[in-house]
Image (spheres, grey):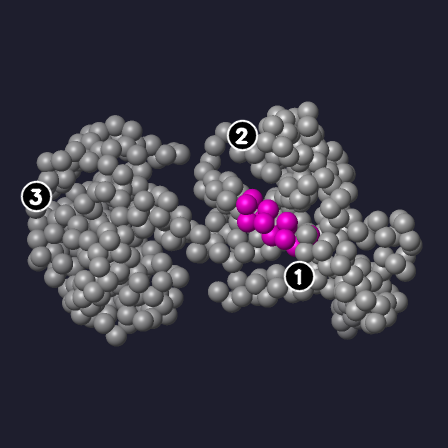
Amino acid sequence: MLSCRNMEYSVGDFTLRDFSLELERGDYCALLGPSGSGKTVILELIAGLRPLKKGSVFIEGKDHTLTPPQHRPVGLLFQDYALFPHMSVYENIAYPLNIRGINKIEVWETVRTFAAELDISKHLNRMPGTLSGGEKQRVALARTLVIHPLVLLLDEPMSALDAPLRENSVALLNNVSAKGITILHVTHDPSEVCTLANRRISIVP
Amino acid sequence: MHYGKNYTSIRLIFLFLSGVMLLFIVAPLLGLFFSTSVPGLFETFKDREVTSSIGLSLGVSALFTILAGVFALPLAYIMARKEFRGKAIVQGLIDIPIVLPHSAAGIAVLGFISRDSALGKFADILGFNLVGSPFAIGVAMAFVSVPFLINAARDGFQAVPERLEQAARSLGASPFRVFRQISLPLAKPSVITGLVMMFARGMSEFGAVVIVAYHPMTTPVLIFDRFNSYGLDYARPVAVLFIIICILVFIALRLLGRKRKET
């Protein structure tokens, strides 16, 4: 499903050498490693936000090594959620749908469906700056899921959340995983993914 | 106790020096305003030569600010986002018009548009003489004022987190769409400030404009012409009128700056 072969990349003092990864459809894989080990860089390489020096990225058997990020069937949930501060919650979630030229009624219905599923319907008119950490995570997740990515990349999704919110977040990610989406979850905290991941990969700096 | 006394004296010295500085800025302007009669000002406002010069200054500056923006914003974005060899040299080039004497800038622009230049020859073939035209005025205005736009926009783009642009890319946006829908709206207050600064600086330009086009007269050139030909009393009302317009633009700039802070 997701096949990363012999990936190589270097930036500044950091070098990634010969990194490979094979995930099946529906896998929930935890990518564990300390800060500075290059976990986020791996996600950005898979998402196409950084160009590979060597190696390849295959998704569903198709070579996406040179595919620009906007054309990869990948969703990336950023550590700080990266919500657009000048757009409302509704506009944030509708953003990827509008890019794809979907008509307004369909956009509205899709946003309402995902907002209801992620329990953020009442926040649709709010601006991201007024949301709590947990609410921001749900909005960012909704924005990523509306494009139906084949692979969902999660970059330390719980690092900005307090302990009670983390439990909610685990339940939320469990629900997403149950839909059969292949998930690669980057974290430095193994306890975060103990009930979520069916696969674990550790990287060292 | 000793500390408190020392602090008070320093505060008094600072207040005095600040007061002198403010007076230095305000006194000549107040003197100008008080020595101009209101009826005289209204007479000047009715003077067609004055109003057409104001129209020319504002119109040409506004047009060339918008035109320059088409080229300046992509450059500002590149300067904010990309690291490349020679970036410091490019930044130096952008700042050159700020440090040049404006008359020298005018001479440089004149060389660029004169009949001997490639652009001048091309215009000549089409039947235009660029020297002494509103085009020449616009080029001179833009040359000395465009660094204000580029630098303000660059700061604005730099303040936009790159993460947001990456998020938009990963959601399916092309690089141009990211620029149009994410980077530009988020940098908008700085870009508007830059545009207003460029416009204000351009319309008040004298040194470079007077060399490339004495006629048609922009207001700064008209003020100089009246002062030179008829004396201070004749030039003063035009100067007051133009200062009022400049202050209105300046107030607009400050209001936009305040809005930016609130955002």
Q: Residue at x 36, y 62 (%)?
A: A87
The answer to whether dots 3 and 1 both sit on one chain is no
Q: Can residue B248 be seen in this view?
A: yes
- For disc 2, the chain is B
Frontmost residue, A24 versus B243:
B243
Circle 1 Cα neighbour tier, 10 Å, few/some/many (<14 / 14–19 / ≥20): some
Write the start and end of the magenta stretch as one range: B57-68
- Disc number at residue B250? 1
In the drawing, does residue B90 fall left or right of residue B263? Answer: right
In the drawing, does residue A2 fall left or right of residue B169? Answer: left
- Residue at numbered disc 2: B86
In the drawing, does residue B207 fall left or right of residue B109? Answer: right
Circle 3 Cα neighbour tier, 10 Å, few/some/many (<14 / 14–19 / ≥20): some
Frontmost residue, A139 versus B73:
B73
Q: Can residue B22 be seen in this view?
A: no
Residue B82 screen position, x and y as percent: 45, 38
In which quadrant of the rendered image does the N terminus of chain A lie? top left
Residue B44 screen position, x and y as percent: 80, 63
- Secondary structure mainly formed by the magenta segment: helix
Circle 2 Cα neighbour tier, 10 Å, few/some/many (<14 / 14–19 / ≥20): few
- Disc number at residue A24? 3
Q: Earlier in the sequence, mark 1 or mark 2?
A: 2
